[in-house]
Image: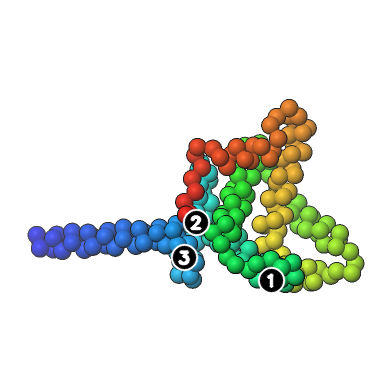
Amino acid sequence: MKIQTQWWIMGASAALFLLVGGTSALSYGVFVKQWEGPGVRWITRVTHFPAARLGWRNVPYTEYLNHFDAERRFLSGPSAKTQGVSSEITPESRKMALDRAMRIAAVEDLAFKYDFSLTSKDIDGAYDQLVARAGTSTTPEEIETFLRDEFGWNKEEFKWYVIRPALFEDGLKQKLLVESPTSTPVETQLQERLNAPDVQRYLRF
């Protein structure tokens, strides 16, 4: 019985060692090297591994990767080439991807603070208006092709990463203008939230 207990302790210790070592390696690979292989993407998605944190609100590493993937796609896409924009990936371009993910989290935080919400109907309606403003010469299919070629997004991803945050910001501005016209502007509040003491940026560029 004593031998079995010793083997159990040794096995548990080995498992703990592997867990700690694996977590440390993943933290180094994510925070310092920004690993983005399929395995890392799967693990960080399942574990909600953070790239940053705003108080209690986690900014998942996978969200950072989604923004970075779109930025990298744009830099190598047709519009960037036409405009003569360099396709080189720099630490600054990676930082911009994290900043966008964090700004969306800050917008969500502010919306929660002021009890402002959106429905899927609101978001779908805003997208439909965008399509309508493109004019009859541009079809919805052409817009979806544009989104895919420029950012690697389908229309649902575009709604989530662009339309939804924009609606939150516009809605908050209108809400405060009506209910609290002397309050601090939304843009200022967002910057203050992003620079608050409880904000942590884990990625190192």
From the viewer's side, name the closer residue of 196 and 143: 196
Q: Secondary structure at mark 1?
A: loop
Q: Which amino acid type is marked by label 1?
A: Gly
Identify the mark nearer the N-term, 1 or 2: 1
Q: Which mark is residue 35?
A: 3
Whether residues under marks 3 and 1 lie with C-beta atoms below 8 angstroms apart, the answer is no
Question: Which mark, by number, is residue 9?
Answer: none
Disc nearest the viewer among 3 and 1: 1
Locate residue 64: give its quadrant.
bottom right
Q: CA distance from mark 3 to mark 2?
A: 12 Å
Vertical comparison of 175 with 39: above or below: above
**In the image, what residue occupies the spot 63% across and 63% down?**
71
Image quadrant for the N terminus?
A: bottom left
Q: Visible in this render: residue 65?
A: yes
Q: Is residue 106 left or right of residue 117?
A: left
Query: Would you call the spot at circle 3 few (<14 residues within 10 Å), some (14-19), or many (20 or more)?
Result: some
Q: Amino acid at mark 2?
A: Phe
From the top left corner, tell me how far across and down residue 146 is, in percent.
75, 69
| Residue positioned 52% across, 55% down in the render | 60
Most extreme residue toward the top is: 182
Q: Which residue is mark 2?
A: 205
What whole-number distance in Å separates the C-alpha atoms at marks 3 and 1? Answer: 23 Å
* Residue with the most extreme right position: 136
Is disc 3 in contact with disc 2, using a CB cutoff of under 8 Å? no
Residue occupied by mark 1 = 77
Among numbered discs 3 and 2, the one appearing first in the sequence: 3
Quarter occupied by residue 17 = bottom left
> Which structural element holds mark 2?
loop
- First in sequence, mark 3 or 1: give its number: 3
